[in-house]
Each structure stands twice: as C-alpha cells, then as structure tokens.
Image: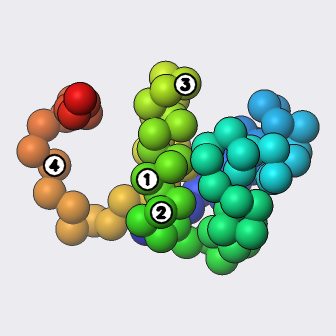
Amino acid sequence: MKLNTKELNKLIDNNFDGNIAKFARNIGLNRSTTFKAIHNKSAGSKFAGHLIAFCDKNQLDFREYIFLPNNVKKINQKLIKVS
C-alpha cells in the first residue's frame, strides 16, 4: 500500500507539531517504524493497521492517508466495524 505522504505530513504538522515521534506514540508504534513508512512512502501491514485504528478512533477517513491498490474488491461502500 502506498501512503499519501502529503496528507499524512499535514496531519502530523497540524496535530502533532510536525513531530513524527509524537505521532508514532499516538498510533502505538515506535518512531523508527513510523519514520521508515513515511519516508519510504509505503505502508506495511503493521503501520497500516495502526494508522487505520487511529483514524477510526479519531473519526478520520484512512483513505485520505493510504492509497489502496486498484485490485481491492469493494463489497460495500460502508466500512464495517468488527467488535
């Protein structure tokens, strides 16, 4: 999955004073994992999962920050929450 680094950096700048370490703590990851994901512009499952959970918790649309591959089959337009 590719990251929308432009929007992700806006999120970090606006909500975490541009501090990647502070953002990493808030999404539950270490700074190095977060830094690598942002600077490589690629989200592994660990980073993506934590980012999606953070977005869900804060009522943000994770699709603003992660570009999904074109071959992902969309079953419903709604995001289904699993409890």
Q: Which of marks 2 and 3 precedes in the sequence? A: 2
Q: CA distance from mark 1 to mark 3?
A: 14 Å
**Considering only vertical position in the picture, is 16 above or below 4?**
above
Q: Residue furthest bottom?
A: 40
**Protein image colouring:** rainbow
Amino acid, disc 3: Asn
Amino acid, disc 4: Lys
User: Label 2: which residue?
Assistant: 46
Horizontal side of 38 relative to 80 (left or right) equals right
Horizontal side of 74 relative to 38 (left or right) equals left
User: Label 4: which residue?
Assistant: 74
Amino acid, disc 1: Gly
* Contact (Cβ within 8 Å) of mark 4 with mark 1: no
Identified at 69% across, 73% down, the residue is: 36
Q: Which of marks 2 and 4 precedes in the sequence? A: 2
Q: Nearer the viewer, residue 65 or 47?
A: 47
* Contact (Cβ within 8 Å) of mark 1 with mark 3: no
User: Label 3: which residue?
Assistant: 58
Residue 73, image x and y in percent? 14, 57
SS at circle 2: helix
User: Label 1: which residue?
Assistant: 49
* Contact (Cβ within 8 Å) of mark 1 with mark 2: yes
Q: Which of marks 1 and 4 precedes in the sequence? A: 1
SS at circle 3: loop
In this rendering, which labeled residue sits more in front, label 3 or label 2? 2
Circle 4: is it few (<14), some (14-19), or many (20+) Cα within 10 Å?
A: few
In this rendering, which labeled residue sits more in front, label 4 or label 2? 2
Locate the N terminus and report the quarter of the image it occupies.
Answer: bottom left
Amino acid, disc 2: Lys
Q: Residue furthest left?
A: 75
In this rendering, which labeled residue sits more in front, label 4 or label 1? 1
SS at circle 4: loop
